[in-house]
Image (tube, coloured by chain):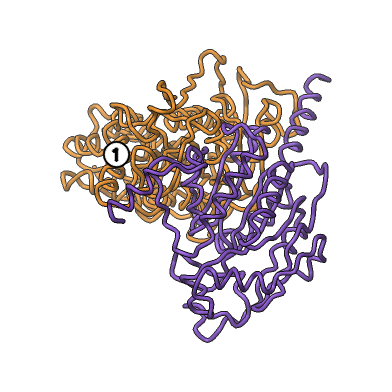
Amino acid sequence: MMSDGNLDLPEILTGEHFTTGNHATAEGALAVGCKFFGGYPITPSSEIAEHMALRLPRVNGHFVQFEDELASIIGILGARWGGYKSMTATSGPGYSLMVENIGLGMMTETPCVIINVQRGGPSTGLPTLVGQQDIMQTKWGAHGDFEPIVLCPSSVQECFDLAIQAFNYAEQYRLPVTVLMDEILGHMSEKLIIPDKSKIKRVNAKKPNVPPEEYLPYKPDKDLVPPMAIAGDGYNIMVTGLTHDERGYPVLDVETQEKLVRRINDKIRKNKDKIIILEEYMLDDAEIAILSFGSVARAAKGAVNRAREKGIKAGLLRLITIWPFPDERIEALANQVKTILVPEINYGQITREVERAAQGKTNVKGLFKMGTMHNPQEILSEIEKCV
Amino acid sequence: MAEEDRELIESHEHPLDGYLREGRIPHIFCPGCSLGSITNVIIEAINEAGFDPKKVSVVSGIGCTGRISGYLNYDSFHTTHGRSIPFAIGLSITDPERKVIVISGDGDLFAIGGNHFIHAARRNADITVICVNNFNYGMTGGQVGPTSYMGQVQTTAPYGFNEESFNLPHLAITCGAVYVARWTALDVRRIKDSFVEAFKKKGFSFVEVLGSCPTTFGRRNQLAEGKKILQHFADHTVLKHDADPKETKIEKNGPFIVGKFVDIEDKPTLTDNLLAIQRISQASDKKS
């Protein structure tokens, strides 16, 4: 059991635990080598900050509670350029404050991780109740064009696993990666199995293998990702949020903008098959599909099981990667099933994406709730209406 | 710029070549702006302080002064408007040997970024903050800012600014800065000495430099040349080390009180305190 005040904890807590999603996320970050957390208290994410404050100093890391979310996000960008894997955690209102500097992270290609434990909005909304209302904020929050990577766990185990995956994607593709949790997941306890240290994959951003006089900090390799020298490596890097050329110098013209913006988008678009993670459950012969994510996917799976007991051919497609969006998979599904039901705790954010991807080839129906999760019976009733 | 002018510039060696990024000159600063000479002084001071160049990082926000970081041939970071200080904190705590210097303007550091300044001073973050105060927003065309003085005319104060201005040394001292000084852009030798002291100081050091901005400030305030602004400074400057910070407020016709106002030794820095927390947390490991 990971409890507050238990100080006797090594770097990686290999073994079985009974713990919360928020604590599991923090442990996942530590397991993958996070050395800096900058954050600001906000319900329902604060336990992540508290756990990092307890744990980071013991693994030679640093925890700073900043004056606001603006400082938190930019502080972790700074720490990453200093060589520390870094993260912050917040909820919707705090994420809103962070988006400008998430844009800076996209433009400067800075690996870092932002955990958003979603609550109900808009504005202060429902601090202690669940929401899935930040889907579009993570995609379109910051100005300009960029392709984010956003992951969405639906169990405590997955909070741990996806914290690791988020850091690894951030390092591999050089961008801020968001994990969209929700209040239910953050606060509920269930079994977590932490593997041995040797089984935990740790990706580090590529380093340059040329001398400083030959190094171009924003010249990509074939995978469209440039090798990353950091402060103190002797490369005298220049990092700016302005449109920049391969030297990192600001060049404010059409050609440079075309080249840079297309590349920072294409490095994700062209690798999306490697980035998209989906869970498919009983979809092979399904006639009705539920598309779900986060806590709600647990109820959706329950509804599929009950429908199958009644002889209804239902199946589940669970989005583990929310962005980039699995357009092709959904189009194929649309060609197979009569209906795609989309239960979500908002007023239709993912539903609209599913409609777009389905291209009119099937019936898409959103099941929207506010401030609470669907129960399996509610979803089952909707499945039965579709038969 | 005409091709022959560019050739003339590139054919001449400058003593600080190598400290400026190749291919970045000519700079964007206006004729009569003091940022060129301040850039020069920053490089000289970094050299005189004797740092390993690999251990120097320069961070800035947005604005004319914020562009200095992009000319310097050190690890340099040009961040978002107002956010240079927390970026610098993240960078500094990753290596206690790293010297992190923030160079930005009055609007960036004290309007949009004011909250970060006061908290960085309170935490005694191990960074130096240089503010070039030109009394207005130059990059955006001459709006008033938090250091504009009563009666100053700018595009967003066409009838004269009618708010109180920030007294920056007073603010820094009150919030806990361990080194605080102010100079005008005319005092280049004193600025350099002060930068060296500030750079070598462990903890949060702050130097305000009153800069000349003829284009967007001077033109509207009867000081339309850089020379006139510097003359105005010279005519109204009072050197007063250890001045009572309550007296260092700036008004149109001065006095511009300059000097070193605070120099405190041995106050633990944010980095010191974070490392101490590591030792405390790990000692409880060993006990158990």
Q: How many marks?
A: 1
Rendered image quadrant of residue B259: bottom right
Left or right position of A249 against A265: right
Left or right position of B233 against A265: right
Tell me where residue A21 appears, x and y as whole percent: 56, 35
Rendered image quadrant of residue A176: top left
How packed mark 1 is, by other alpha carbons closer than 10 Å (few <14, some 14-19, many 20 or more), is some
State the residue at coordinates (53%, 80%). B222
Tell me where residue A193 appears, x and y as whole percent: 56, 21
Tell me where residue A247 appears, x and y as whole percent: 37, 38
The relative height of residue B86 versus residue B172 in the rendered view (above or below) is above
State the residue at coordinates (49%, 79%). B220
Residue nearer the viewer, A356 or B220: B220
> Looking at the rendering, in which quadrant would you find the N terminus of chain B?
bottom left
Residue nearer the viewer, B234 or B67: B234
State the residue at coordinates (44%, 30%). A228
Q: Which residue, given by chain and number where applicable, does mark 1 sit on?
A: A263
Residue nearer the viewer, A21 or B198: B198
Residue nearer the viewer, B242 or A318: B242
The relative height of residue B21 versus residue B159 in the rendered view (above or below) is above
Tell me where residue A34 appears, x and y as whole percent: 57, 30
State the hue of chain B. purple
> Looking at the rendering, in which quadrant would you find the C terminus of chain B?
top right
Rendered image quadrant of residue A88: top right
Q: Amino acid at mark 1?
A: Arg
Asked whether residue A295 is in view, the answer is no
State the hue of chain A. orange
